[in-house]
Amino acid sequence: MLEENQSTTENVENGFISDNLTTPLIYQERTQRRLIPFLYLFFLWTGKLMRKGYKGELKQVDDVFDLPNNLNLNTLGSVLSHPLETETSTFAPILLRVYGRQFFLLGILRFIGDILKFAGPILLHMLISSLQANKEMTTSYICCGLMFITMLFASLCDVHFGYRIQFLSMKAKSALLLAVYEKLLRIPAYKITDDFSSGKLINLMCTDIDRIGEFICSFHAFWGMPMDFIIALYLIYKEMGLAFLAGVLASVILIPLNKLIASKIGKYSNEMMSVKDARLKLVSELSHSMRTIKLNSWENFFETKINLIRQKELKYLRYIKFLDAICVYLWASAPSLITLMILATFTLILLEQLTAAKVFTTLALINILIMPCSKFLPMGSRLYDNRITEDLQQFYSPISNSTTLIELEKNSFGWKSKENVVRSVQFKGEPGMLIGIIGPVGSGKSTLLVGILAETIIEGPPILLNERVLSEGFAYVGQDIWLRTGSVKENILCELSYSPERFRSAIDVCALTMDVENMPGKENYRIGGEGVTLSQKVRLALARAVYADKLIYLLDDPFAALDGTVASFVYENCIEKQLRSKGKLVILCTHHERFLGRADLIVQLDGEGNVLKAGPPEVILPNIVENQIIKQTENASEEENGGNLSQPMEAAEYVSVIDNEEKEEGTVKIRIYKTYIKAIALQATRNATDVWLSKWSSANNSEHNNSKLFLQQDWGYPFASRYIIPLTSINEQNQQMFYLRIYIAIVCLNSISTLTRAFLFAIACIYAAKYLHQRLLSRILKANINWWDKTPCGRATNRLSTDVSIVDTSLPFQLNICLASLFSLIGTLILTLVALPLLSLLLLPLFIIYYYIQKRICAITLSPLYSHLSETVSGLITIRSLRISEFFSSKMRTLLGYNLRSSFSSLAASTWLSVRIQMLGLFVLTIILLASILDVTIFKLSHPGLIGLAITYALSITNVLNGLLTSFIETEKELVSVERICDYIDNVPEEKESSLLNNDDIPTIITPIKGHICFENVSLRYSPELPLAINNVNFRLKAGTRTAIIGRTGAGKSTILQALLRAHPIETGRILIDDNVDLANLGFKCARSLFGYVSQHPFIFSGTLFDNLSIANTNLNNTQIEACISERGLSQWLEQFGGLNKIICEGGNNLSFGERQLISLLRLSLTRPKIILIDEATAHMDEQTHLLMSRLISRIGCTLIAIVHRLTGLDEHYDWVIEMSNGQIVREGPPSLFSQK
């Protein structure tokens, strides 16, 4: 049922797919593997991708490989979703059952590679022994040939294992991501409110699933560790005899020590993740309410609050990094320390002589031995709670063969916390009925509606529901309006097929005709930022509901945000003529009781959520005059026919066009490295230990060429008896002590330098993480409002979640490895050239890195994922009520597919390069082996010790080269996050403060101000290409004047407030405060500090009631706030609410909309600003609470400007009224002038 041209719109959405789609590269691995195994073995099938990269043509997702069949997301999505839904076990056994066979088959490949790597030390022993004994060259050539073959196969096994295990990790991560997302679409709202904040959900998607992927990639190291450990120890024993026990002792100490450190790291990681959840939850709340935060100058408060949470996060990160530093120290210094212990035992206790063969064979084996001791990796344990899905069948019981659409039989509804419970509701709904739900603020009206949608806990018998409604769903319009990032048309259709007549009808009956006509691009006008600046949000949501054509409509006070004329028109044309006349059941919660005169049933709730009474309007609301409603709606219809019902849309609503996310091309710029790198590796001392061993063994060899062996060498090594050369004199023992003392000194120096490097690097990385996050957060919070209007929330959240997480954890790890690998390679090449000078003639330009594709495209494709996730979380109730979950799941698969294509192509490209680097290393090894034989037999330039050292390093050069390549690529990938953070730090536009006045002067400026306001010929437009939102506005208000601004939707009322708050610069005229302070000369913070602003959509964040009330005045304590509340006559409300320590959920989800507005107004009254600006903030309050809050505001005694739609009470609560139309003042005067209208 999708519209045909909608796919094209999706292709350009968010800017990560080009407008001109190119033909993607076809993944041909399977075909090429069947035809030419050689192409598969060396990854030649990636040639087209690499050629495009070489030409610089990899700039967008459509330039890379299409997904292979076994990464088909339609298949992957169901692989885990079904088992996770039908079984009660945790995800791990299910993951193992689904992917276990592939996983363990890869273990065989890993096993072969691990066994082959031991051939190097064994053949090295045989080769050096042959060279020392000056035997026939045939043996040496055979050793060289075998070493080349075994290393070739070991390299290929390693490359293919790495490729396949990462491919499997991608499959598992994608399947998990889809399974979590699809489960999210089925979790009732009360479960998400209490168990999963948006911060936890984002953290789950960003971090925890990545940890699972990392575990999959590293799991085979767990069984490989003991195998490598045992084989390495046995071979060391064959070389060094009982001295190997010293190595065993060192390893026995290292393994439990690493395990202890890993367990501590795991503990601190879990605690850090909990703190990170809290930070991301707050970030998510702020990103959805930045306009309100900025207009109230609360940026500093929340910056401080987030930084305090970040400090706790960094505390745990510091523990982790210091423990990591100890691990790095143990890993880096362990080879030298173990070698020292073995050699000291060998020479001082066993009194045996060292030879080059023994030394360098043992050294190669110790390098293998140390890896099992350092690879004990902890795994994050949080991912999936399989017991949170609810089956709708347990909430509903289908009705068949009846006209009844829904029937409640004494059902109760509530949240997990048992608050706002609605008790014993009973009614029956039939086609064409209008059922009204009324009651004071906090009585549970909204809870009742979402409870009917099965989004709350339901007590009592199952709700009886028509079978068609059960399958097709409801049309729901809540108070928190949910709009998607997309066009007006896409928001109304909401993935239904397009019918021009039906679409036009939905627009007409919701009074949107003129608004849509005045939009740029009309119905194709794209909105972003959840439409925060749109005054048509409610009517768009209502039009979406009308277009959905459901049998039951659940409407939560849609008239609160509409002026009286428009509200009357919508009631008559939408509810009466469009819905009820066509047999739709409408359940309407409202404080506007005048619209319930023609209701069939009214259910009245008391303040405790109990049904006070239920019956027809004449019984429940006898004072309603139906004729008044009829008259108003008739007038509304006449005005609509005259084309004057809707004002042209305010220009503020045009500016929410979504900017495409920019991406850099090519490698990461040098300045990004300079931004991050704060430490330098120290490699020289490590190489010095090996050089000294070479000198030691060579000295022994030259003095004992004629020594008699006690046991003859057997070429059956490693299974034969070993031979020994005893120390036979005191001079020999003294010489051994000399070399040993020097070696100990070098090892100690290496150990100290390694420890220093590890901790300096850890400290520098912690500082870098703190510095980048602080600057990023500060820049984002100080970004101008236009930037926030145009930027999807998912982008900012992505920077502060995924990118910051990479800077915190994986980037330091990868950069450390990269630096260590780089200096190791330099040391290896230098020592190899020193040992074999002739090699310098052969090692010409052999190291050419031939790659372009990076994780940058992957990073770009992540932002739409997070934006889509954020949209889904905020609109879950609407999505489920309309039964369009399958579309959102499909869109998630599409967006994930884009990301997966770039990730897969990146993996293919890096593996292509890895194969060539492995072959380069083998080529270098072969040259060194041949040069060694020629040097010993012909040139005789080097002694056996140096040759042994060169070959030992040559054996590892393949791993060093591959490690450097891998770590460099991974570091470049991770540094893309630093680049993206720096891009925001450098390029996000800030609000430019005035150079005339400084924010430090705020108290001096504000204190004497009384509150006079003067508009002189003020005009404002939101963008140069847009019409004026207000045109030549002039008015003057005295200090203390209470002014109401009235006018139809889009008349320019909100723009007056926006101009005062400097949300957008005025084009002409000026705004004066107290006749001598020009707002344009004040800094933004200073100007906004004059005002207290409450928007129509109240901002409430997770925390206590005290936290929410003390945002703008942190000096207030509990006693002072309670006293202020008591002065305003709200002591009883506070007691019923639960006190100042009452916990408020994310976004105030455990509060009614009216309660949120009440808290916002109460917070405003506590700050005592000079001027109060209110944008219809009492819209969702019942009449009694509305009057209470109006009296509360009037007692503050400051200048008040309020946008109102309710004309009742103007005489009592306001001194002056301004009427707006088409961006101009058409009339102003005392309230009595308007009451006569």
Image (cartoon, grey):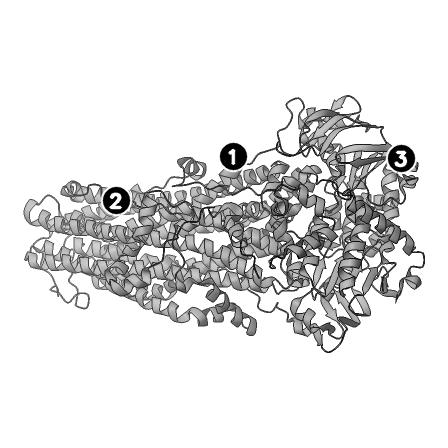
Compared to residue 984, the image places residue 1083 above or below, namely above
Q: Earlier in the sequence, mark 1 or mark 2?
A: 2
Taking the image as drawn, is residue 762 in sight? Answer: no
What amino acid does circle 1 point to?
Answer: Asp
Mark number for residue 986?
Answer: 1
Circle 2 residue = 847
Give me the residue at 23% from left, 51% from top: 921
- Residue 417 vs 1040, above or below: the answer is below
Q: Nearer the viewer, residue 852 or 328?
A: 852
Q: Residue under label 3, please give it.
A: 1215
| CB under 8 Å between discs 1 and 3 | no
Q: CA distance from mark 1 to mark 2?
A: 35 Å
Residue 1087 at x, y percent in the picture:
71, 30
Looking at the rendered structure, the secondary structure element under dot 1 is helix
Q: Secondary structure at mark 2?
A: loop
Contact between marks 1 and 2 (CB within 8 A): the answer is: no
Instruction: Estimate the spatial distance between the alpha carbons at disc 1 and disc 3, rounded to whole Å.
Output: 48 Å
Which residue type does callout 3 highlight? Answer: Asp
Report the disc number at residue 445. none
Kindly state the secondary structure of the residue where label 3 is placed. Answer: loop
| 5 displayed left or right of 65 | right
Q: Residue 21 location, x and y as percent?
A: 44, 49
> Looking at the picture, how far across and down is residue 87, in whole percent?
55, 74
The quarter of the picture where residue 1176 lies is top right
